[in-house]
Image: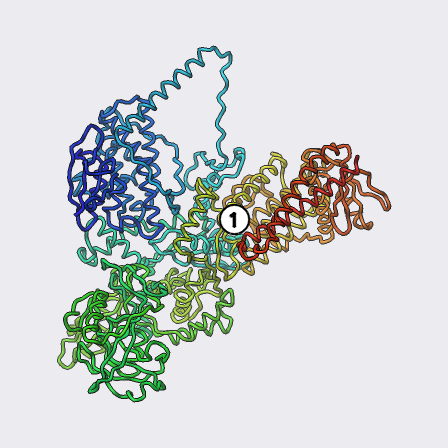
Amino acid sequence: MPTLYLSPHPENFQNHRVLIAAHYAPTLPEVVELPEQGLLLQPPASCPLPKLPALESRPGVWVSGPAAVAHLLCPERLRGQGPAGCALVQQWVSYAEGEIAPAACAAAFSALGLVEQSKQVVERAVAELHLALAVLDGHLKLRTYLAAEAVTLADVTVACALLLPYKYVLDPPSRAVYPNVTRWFLTCVNQPQFQAVLGPVKLCEQARGGDAPKPKTQEPVVPAEMGPAAGSAPGPGEAPVKSASQLKKEAKKKEKLEKFQQKKEKSQQQQGEKKAKAEKKEKKDPGVLTYDTPTRLGEKKDVTGPMPDAYSPQYVEAAWYPWWESQGFFKPEYGRQCVSEPNPKGLFMMCIPPPNVTGSLHLGHALTNAIQDALTRWHRMRGETTLWNPGCDHAGIATQVVVEKKLWRERGQTRHDLGREAFVREVWKWKNEKGDRIYHQLRKLGSSMDWDRACFTMDPKLSYAVQEAFIRLHEEGVIYRSKRLVNWSCTLHSAISDIEVDKKELSGRTLLPVPGYKDKVEFGVLVSFAYKLEDSDEEVVVATTRVETMLGDAAVAVHPQDPRYQHLHGKHVLHPFTGRRMPIVCDDFVDMGFGTGAVKITPAHDHNDYEVGQRHGLDYVTIIDDSGCLINVPPPFLGMKRFEARGAVLEALKQKGLFKEVKDNPMVVPVCSRSKDVVEPLLKPQWYVRCEGLARGAADAVRRGELRILPPFHCKTWFQWMDNIRDWCISRQLWWGHRVPAYFVTVDDPSVPPGEDMDGRYWVSGRSEEEAKDKAAKAFGVTPDKISLRQDDDVLDTWFSSGLFPFSIFGWPNASEDLQVFYPGTLLETGHDILFFWVARMVMLGLKLTGKLPFREGLHAQLLESNLEPAEVERARQGQKSDYPAGIPECGTDALRFALCAYTSQGRDINLDVNRILGYRHFCNKLWNATKFAVRSLGAEFQPPPGPEPSGAESLIDRWILSRLSLAVELSDAGFRAYDFPGVTTAIYNFWLYELCDVYLECLKPVFAEGEAAAVVAARCTLYTCLDAGLRLLSPFMPFVSEELFQRLPRRAPQAPLSICVTPYPSPEQFCWRDGGLEGSVEFSLGIVRAVRSLRADYSLTRTRADCFLQCLDSGAADAASRCSAYIRSLSSSGLVRVLGPGEAPPTGCAVAVASDKCTVHLLLKGLIDAEKEITKLSGKQGELQKQIDRLRERMETPDYGTKVPPKVQESDATKLQQSQTELQKVTEAMETFQRMI
């Protein structure tokens, strides 16, 4: 047994940490307490390591230090699940040791009087402690534990580090600031393992040594790796744990340093400085500006003040969403008397794919909601009656698992300890406390839903619809009772749907962890064994990946054409353990090339075998119960767990001489996504929906074009599913969910024989027990008093209630205004991964129960899920840590939404790049600066004209930008109609960045500075039109920044809409000012600008304005260049811009560049630079480049270069060579140009 050596000090939190970790393990080590020597904890003399606690795991093998000892003593589950979980646990352990423990010890030791420290040192220690507590409080806001759903080593380490502060430093007012940390701390210390070591923990009532220093109000900067998306692995070494003496020395050092600093400051003051220098204000990072103006929830944000220097997501996103909600902008009633009021512009309705109540927003949700909200906002801005209906799914299995874990963690109880009603109350309590988390996150994302219509699938309205749907379908015979094979989770004790089964692919022998088993279980092997023929010594060899199921075998199957077994047709084999006589059957499903060509048939525990059993009338021998233990088998196998029986059966076959071989076999293991248990096919009586007729209607709707699935290639999958559909099992053996409204009938009448569970005649459905009893009495011809009923304990599959969602949210089956107006909906947008599980079932149930399709179009996209190996994931994390050592910068909601929509090409998976989101955050800053410039240029007195139509006084560049704006409006309208979101975002991005900001605003600067009054007025009106329309184009994708900037612009009329989200979206009919000829002229001029800029860069003309001479091929080009010469001069930072006449030569000393096939640019350099000096400089550069080229060529010409050098390096060398050659050519040309100037 391992021996643990500790110091006996009762307040040693490192001892507590080690002992608590040990209490989570199955067995405790022997504990030896050693006498304390001062403040240093010395290990026993035989220990070669320097400090306590120390662990002697076996004689002569030692480990010391609390981190290492706790890690070794705790069970594996406390160290984290998977690489990411382990990394996160280790990060928190390192954070506790490096940040929390030193601050906690310094604060507590001072309070306890163990060390004497100055007031400043104590205050600093307490401030550091509060900073750490703030980090923890933010992290624990939505979590029960630090790194997982249960206690891990992270919780043990951090809780122990905080023991002393919670006992002696943090009084009630101090604790009140950190409610999440305190809640978590109390949860931890009340765990049985903590209690066994600590006993009752009494929290501090009054801080020792006077009032407890209160925390500062500044918001702490949470380390990126400690945030919700933590994933970066810690460094290779752990942070060192500091002893009390080391902490004391550090405190003294700090105190001395402070005294020295005070003396130094005093000395400077005494030197008699004549003027005290004004303290330089620390420049705040504009990226983290916050909106601090007091604004009550729901009031409009104050935008009367000056715009901050730069765009800040926190500043921009503050206060707008509550105002949008309070004004009712997202309600379909906005701007009209009622929703049924006719609207000539049309109607748009879409319901959200209801997220699980247990969930939190992930990128998949962000993607679908960004798309859905962009569509919703576009339709709303077009003036349509618009409703985007929110809702949440009760997530039967997921929610029950969460609450069961919580009960066990907090009370040590199971749901069976509470009983069904009390457990369901606990689930509702949890839902009311935690269930709206995803709603808050959707608001943060800017989702413009009508929250007054939000629905939960367990609400009374929706529950009534579920009950009604079941009863109607049961009465029609569409829902029926049957005993069939289902996917069974032995851990959950329930059937699960196909979408909750993960397919784990194995290449060969693999050991997998299975809940309820101490050791890992072997999978990925094929076991061969023999069955003896009846009345013969001949044997038939079969192969199986699940040898334990041979105890339930009912037959051996061979292919009817297999010549090896022709003589065995119609014969029998004997079961070696039960003596069961089993027929050899012929079936085409047998693969003659797999194994021996003979297959064991276990109809009760395999889906293929079940169908074989049905075809040949075989017995169904169930040998595994709901818990995964063996039944209906002889000893010694009876009662064994299924995977323990695997080894026992194999050994028994060997003893009987029937075992042949074991070999690796690639296979797929079905794993329950909720419990991680291996799924077991079991025969269970369940409720089923007959799907053949329903599916036919759903398939025909697509074939007739009544339902459009986008992109169209998903139609093939749709038809495959619909044309080959199987009946749908809707029973779940849970307590949380819609209980099946069906009752088993027992008749107290000797003329009526007792019924069986499988007999559908003995099941009735009803809206109440009384109604069901009346139905049963009528069916059996007896009086109601002769009837006894037992309601089915099962609940309905969550997908059943979700399938009713599009009409149950409007009160179906009861008539309502909303049901009449909004059903069927316009569109459903969701991930293609649930095309069958949800979309198809909505269509089938909608057609059956309402006679209408639930929507007319279905749009599908999906983020690409990671399939990297753990080692690759780790490398990616390290790369992320290298690229973003301070964490990923805050990009903001608008940038994320824009990035997701820009990625979303129909039907393509998405690999999201953080740098692209960061790029769109910079785009937001460009919008900010452009609007800031515009507001300043328009002036406080500017009043825009009533409409955007040009006045006729516009300049050439004004007319060009209006033409480009018209194109952007045209492309945006077409893109939205075609669901081409990348097309829309690209059009808007190009207009704002490359046309408005890069060209038009630059051309306006000289106009506003020195232009004529009429030109300034026209420019201001054009600029306003571009900003107003550009922000409206952008609003569906970037609602926050577009609203912020829109509110800072003046309005065309006093009765203009209050918000940009209800302002008309620009239409091609209104913005119809395209001028192709003008655009061609300006594009020709911009080509000249690019050529000039290239020359300026080549000759390092950073501030000098060189004269530019343009040699044009024809009069048309010369005319275009002449008309745009002022803009060319401004955009290219040139001095004079002159178009040369026919036959006119440019002056000598010019650098030359070709702008296009119709224009050559001559940039006059003579007199601006020292030609000889430049030649000398370039000569040296020419030599260096030539050497680089020679080295690269020499390397690439070696004989074995093509075979020994990796392809990536070869590619890199080729690129470098090409770049060096291009650069050398430019240097040579520049030298020739300078030579001509001498």
Q: Determine if residue 51 is in view.
A: yes
Query: Splitting the image into 4 quarters, where does residue 463 fall?
Result: bottom left
Query: Splitting the image into 4 quarters, where does residue 22 fall?
Result: top left
Q: In this view, does 552 lie above or below 163?
A: below
Q: Residue at left 77%, top 35%? A: 1166
Image position, residue 721 (x, y; %)? 42, 72
Q: Determine if residue 482 is in view.
A: no
Query: Which image quadrant: the C terminus?
Result: top right
Q: In this view, does 244 lie above or below 810?
A: above
Q: Residue at left 39%, top 39%? A: 222
Q: Is residue 79 left or right of residue 935?
A: left
Image position, residue 126 (x, y; %)? 31, 29
Image position, residue 309 (x, y; %)? 54, 34
What residue sits right under mark 1 in the picture?
Answer: 916
Q: Residue at left 45%, top 51%? A: 447
| Way the structure is coloured | rainbow
Nearer to the camera, 115 or 209: 115
Nearer to the camera, 1012 or 404: 404
Name the amino acid, label 1: Arg
Nearer to the camera, 630 or 427: 630
Q: In this view, does 881 lie to the left or right of 1170?
A: left
Query: Splitting the image into 4 quarters, where does residue 1123 fall?
Result: top right
